[in-house]
Amino acid sequence: MESPSEPAARGPELVEPIDAVEISDTRVEPAEKPAVRQRDIKSFFSPGAAQHPVPIRAQPLGAGDAVGNERRGGAAGPSSGQQPKRKKTAGDALRAQKRKAGVLEKPTVAAPQDKWENEGFRRAEYARLMATKQLEDNAGILSFDEVAATLKCSVCCEFAPSGAHTIFSRGGSTAIRRGTFADHLASDSQARALDARTERAQWGTAQDKAHAAAAPGMCALLRAAHSTAKNMQPVTAYVSIAETMAASSTPGVVPDGAYLSASAGRDMMGCISRVLDEELLAAVRRSPVTGIMIDESTDRSVQSHIAFYVTYLTEANDVKIRFLQMENLAAASAEAIATAVMDVLKDNDVDVKNVLSFTSDGCSVMTGCRTGVAKRLEAENAFMVAVTCVAHKLALCVSGLVKDCAELVAYDKLLGEIATYFSKSCQRLDSLKEVQAMLGEPVLVMLKKHNIRWLSRASCVERVRTCLPALLDYFEKEAKDNGTNARSIYEQISSSDFIILTAALDDIMGLVSTLSRLFQDREFSFLNVKNLIDTSVAALRVKYMWRDEPVVPTRPVRGTAAAATQRQPPLAGRGVREALKQLDEGAAEGTWRGHNVTPPTIKGRSTTRRQPLSYEQLEVSDTISSIVDQLTTDMVERFPPSSMGVLSSFDIFHPSHLAAAPDNDAAMLQYGEESFEYLVGFYAAGSFWKPHICELERCGRSNLAKLLQIMLIIQPASAEVERGFSAMNKIKDTQRASLLLPSLDVLMRIAINGPKLREFEEMLPAVLKVWNTGRRVPQRSSHATRPTRVKTHTVEGGTLDHMSGIMLPI
């Protein structure tokens, strides 16, 4: 209890009642205020009361109350004997100790003019008004800002005209009173906001009616816009399709009607692209794990672009690879590319911590061990696995082989001469086609090698081998007519060594081409890379290289330390064996399939022979063997097991390994133990995988969903990006070389990610909704001159004519 000599120091604190005031260890709670009678302040500080201050207590009304005694003229003090003392509790003692220690301070009472500045008071007052239903009639207009604890008018916030905003439409009113809001409802600003809302509703109704009337025609035009972009046609093709639809009396599409222009077609394509982009980003954000693929290229206008593709999983765990967007590339440096990647992920609200795979073409800028793009991205996410495109690696093996082998350089040059010979003259090409038709062979043209295309060289070799009989007939005739180029080509292709080399290269390049196609398949998994490389290398070496094979003795020999080996000759491919057979059949006449050819060169012997040809006896077999040796060695070096890194540990999920696993339960418990522990150690090192991977051990490794999802989104090849660049070159051809990046991005998104025409109906409602939200209104049906309209403005005292400046009476 405070001493009686301190009432003056406490007097100012009781000017305004507050929620809870501690006086003499007695608290008045807000919930008890309706049932408690408080002392009159003036009578409390009367001279008689100053000598014996009585604390304000939460006590029900009764005859013994000190306030009742004062109103009846009785004395207020301890001598009255009407106030029983309240027993102190443990909470009172604890609060007293905290108050002495300075931990608990006495609450201060705000001045009357500052009470609305108290955020807690405003919230409590609003809760009281809502509890007593005093603002129930204005519930649709009233808006309480939970952050700032202010009262707002939702109508004024959305529909207030410019320059007519009030405190209820800006930050909100801090005076949480029913009367304040009632005054605002009766103000002119509220009336103008309500008029604006009505006007906008009427406009929206008229717009909806216009959209409903134009819906059949709009659907038909949207289909035309989608078909144009999907087929990579210019926007002018949309105009032709729309005009054809109008001439064919398509419902809703009339000649010279609305939305038949190229600009309208571009707007429609933009709406389709927007819907596709929103659906893609929503699916990517739902995916548990994602991956990205990027590559850089130059378009027709010599502008450098970088293409972004994203890999994600659907709810059914199906792998999807989709085009994300195209961006300009200011500099082809690792820093610029890494910055562009992070900006794209941030702009599309894709968490970089969820991106666990990064696939590129493997150039030094992308995969540099110190400052490459992959290293910079790994600094943002340590669990991101960088993958080099296996199709690029295989293409580098072939291109490096041609550069280092002199025989292949000469062969490559000959292929170019043959293709150029016919590409310069249509008369020569027609003559070749006549020879092909006369021999009963397919009518084909010669292909020109493309240095960038991965399968170009294999296609050229295969075409020459198929058309070789027709080429021999044609160039033999041309050589007799004293054609210098024709004679040079004929002397080279009429050699038996050339025929055998072409058959062998067709077999070798065909195998490499098949391997490259497998790598480019959308369903290809990186788990199969090592097996396919090992199988291909073994097949090439068995066919075209000498090898040592162990000899299994018929009877076991005692005392032998190691099994004996025997040198085995190459088996040769099927095409080579067929060519040798055909050469043997015409050996007497010196022909091959009826054409005069020079005999093959045999090791250590003259060209005249009487025995059948054996592949290992030919000198060309050594050339082929060196080619295969160099190719297979490069393949092994470019695809070492160490290059797979953490990916090699995923082999425990390969179907062939699972099928070869032991059948008994004890052995199965040890299957893949080392690889699994490595994966757990790699991904559980950070907080991202702790809630997932760490559960695997506690669950007995019964839930491997997360590891399988990671395995699915890792793409071993960036062939999808190369297909995107092919689409870019078709869209931005020489006739549309000035196409800007935003338009190119829209057209590529529709061409690559857009559904087929028969499936477009499913997304048509969403596209139509986006189109209608643009507040477009069809053109006027009447093209007559618009009536003259006078713009006026209502002001106080009348209406002001803006053209004449005359005040018109209301």
Image (spheres, grey):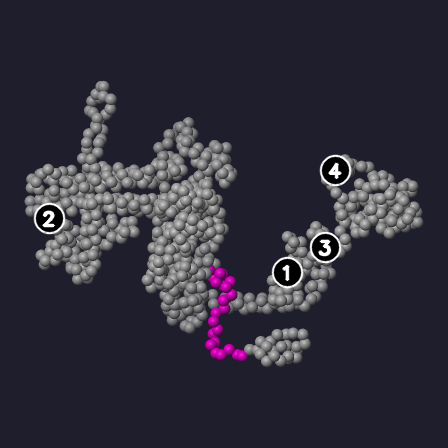
Location of the N terminus (image quadrant): top right
Residue 39 — which label? none
Labels 3 and 4: the sequence-earlier one = 4
Residue at mark 2: 597
Mark 1 touches mark 3? (CB < 8 Å): no
- Magenta highlight range: 767-788
Q: Is residue 132 visible?
A: no
Would you call the spot at circle 4 few (<14 residues within 10 Å), some (14-19), or many (20 or more)?
few
Amino acid at pointer 1: Arg
Residue at mark 1: 170
Location of the C terminus (image quadrant): bottom right
| Rendered image quadrant of residue 202 | bottom right
Looking at the image, which residue is at 38% across and 50% down? Answer: 295
Mark 3 touches mark 4? (CB < 8 Å): no
Residue at mark 3: 116
Amino acid at pointer 4: Ala
Looking at the image, which residue is at 50% across and 68% down? Answer: 777
Residue at mark 4: 101
- Secondary structure at badge 1 equals loop
* Distance in Å between CA atoms under marks 1 and 2: 95 Å
In this view, the mark in front (3 or 4): 4
Labels 1 and 3: the sequence-earlier one = 3
